[in-house]
Structure formats: structure tokens, C-alpha cells
Image: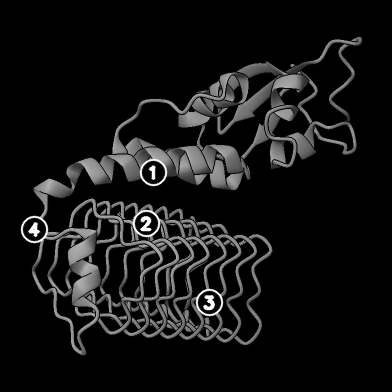
Amino acid sequence: MTMYSDNSSSIVRLNIGGKKFCTTVDTLTQREPHSMLAAMFSGRHTVCKDSEKGYVFVDRDGKHFRHVLNWLRDGVVPNLSDLECSELLREAEYYQLLGLVDGITEVLNKRKEDEEMDTELTRTDIIKCVQSEKVRLRGVNLSGLDLSKLDLSFVDFSYACLKNVFFSRANLHCAKFRDVDAENTIFHNATLRECEFTGANLRGALLAGANLQSANLQDACLVDCSFCGADLRSAHLQTADLTNANLEGANLEGANLKGAKLTNANLKGANLQRAYLRQVNLRGTHLEGAKLDGANMLGAIR
């Protein structure tokens, strides 16, 4: 059923994870014409809606969708807390609203610059440090720093406070993050191959598109993390807590998930070929479209 059955009206009714919204086709298509929402309601596609009240259902948390609509209406980035900004950033990336993604990133970067005076080191200090052969930043407070796009390979961040740090597109190959506090930290599209995150707190972190091949995430807190499209081939995720984590489209081929908590985790379309899922509790885990060829699922609870 198409969206244009409302007698020449351009009104659109949306059900975003149970929250109801009403807007127009123009709002959804004009400001961000290349977004997923614009594609859905451009008239080129058929979308389904419930027969009773004509709502189109989208399986996302509706908490921040009003901010998405306000952005599409006004082009203004909302004034939110850092945590809420990170949550909204994930929604903007999902809906492919590139203007909103850039706007949120700019706001957060500005805040980090304003907060740098409260940290033990600045971005400039870090750049000077990484020119040395061996860099150890163990136990240092780097909260809020923008370290995006830097080459930080082999740096030892163990036990450091990395809350809200921006590591977007940074090279962190073989870096050590043992027992760090990296809550809500941004690792978007970062290179994290063979990194050690044992025991790390990454609650709410954004790792979409990150390269985590052979990374060690054993015992890590990965609650509410976003791994959309991430490369987790041969990653070590034993006893990691992935409750509510979003791994849609992630590549987990050959990953070890022994003892991992996957309650309400989103693994739709994920590649789990040859993954170790033996005796893992998969009840409540979303596995629609996931590839499970060759996965070791002996005793797995489904």
C-alpha cells in the first residue's frame, strides 16, 4: 500500500517503535533528499501501513524521533546532553541523515574543545606523545578529547578514563584499552584490529563501521553499543555483555561468543558463519536474515 492514499493529502502517519508521529511528505523528503526516509516516501517505493489507522511502522526507538523531525523541518541541531546527542547520532546514522550527523558531530566537537582545559592532556599533547616509539597513557583522564583521525596504533590506554572521547576514523591498531572507562565514546569507522578491550566499560559506545578484526573484547561491558556494519571477524567476545547492542549487518565470521549475554541484541543480517555460539542463550536475540552457516550452536538456547 502506498503512502499517497489520503486523497491528495501529503500527511504521513508514522509509528516509530510504538510512538506515533504525524508529518508530511515534504518534511521527510526536502531537507535530506538522499536519506532513507526520503527514499521511503519519495513515491518511488511502496510502503506498508496498518489497515486500521494507516500508520507506517519503523522498528526503531522513538525516543528521539521528534528531534529528527524538527531537524527536517528547521535544520536546527537540538540542544541535548552528550549522552542524548550520542543517541541521536545513532538514529541520524540509521536514517542516513548526513546533514544531522555532521551537525551533531560539530556540536560535540565544540563541547570537547571547551572541556579540554579540564583534562590532564590536550589533543596537541597527545600528538606530541605519539611521535615517541612507545606511548603509555595508562590511567590518564582524557575525557572529552577529540582524537579523531590520529595514528594511535600500539598506544597503551589501559585503565584510562576515555568517556566521550572522539576516536572517529583513528588508527588504533593493536592499542590497549584494558579496563578503560570508555562510556559513550565514539569509535565510528576507527581501525581497532587486534586491540585489547578486556574488562573495558564501553556502555553506549558508537563503533559503527569500525574494523575490530581479532580484537579482544572478553568480559567487556558492551551494553547499548552500536556495531552496525562493523568488522568483528575472529573477535573474542567471551562473556561480554552485549545486552541491547546493535550488531545489524556486522561481520562476526569466526567470532567467539562463548558465554556472551545477547539479551535483546540486534543481529539482523549479521554474518555469524563459523561463529562459536555453543550453549549461548539466544532467546530474545534478533537473528532475522543472519547467516549461521557452519556456526557452532551445540546446546544453544533459542
Name the front one of labels 2 and 4.
Answer: 4
Number of residues whose C-alpha sits closer than 10 Å to that of mark 4, classed few (under 14), some (14–19) or many (20 or more): few
Element type at mark 2: loop
Name the quadrant containing residue 23: top right
Residue 124: where, in percent of width, then height?
22, 63
Residue pictured at 49% horizontal, 60% vertical? 208
Number of residues whose C-alpha sits closer than 10 Å to that of mark 1, classed few (under 14), some (14–19) or many (20 or more): many
The residue at which mark 1 appears reads as 86
Name the front one of labels 4 and 1.
Answer: 4
In primary-sequence order, the first of circles 4 and 1 is 1
- Out of 244 and 181, give the one closest to the viewer: 181
CB under 8 Å between discs 2 and 1: yes
- Out of 183 and 74, give the one closest to the viewer: 74
Residue 196: where, in percent of width, then height?
28, 80
Number of residues whose C-alpha sits closer than 10 Å to that of mark 2, classed few (under 14), some (14–19) or many (20 or more): many
**What label does residue 250 carry, if any?**
none
Residue pictured at 55% horizontal, 29% vertical? 68
Q: Image height check: is 124 above or below 244?
A: below
The residue at which mark 3 appears reads as 252
The residue at which mark 4 appears reads as 120
Q: CA distance from mark 2 to mark 1?
A: 8 Å
Element type at mark 1: helix
Q: CA distance from mark 3 to mark 2?
A: 20 Å
For the residue marked with disc 1, what is the amino acid? Ser
Element type at mark 3: loop
Name the quadrant containing residue 7: top right
Q: Is residue 277 left or right of residue 131?
A: right
The residue at which mark 2 appears reads as 186
Q: CA distance from mark 3 to mark 1?
A: 24 Å
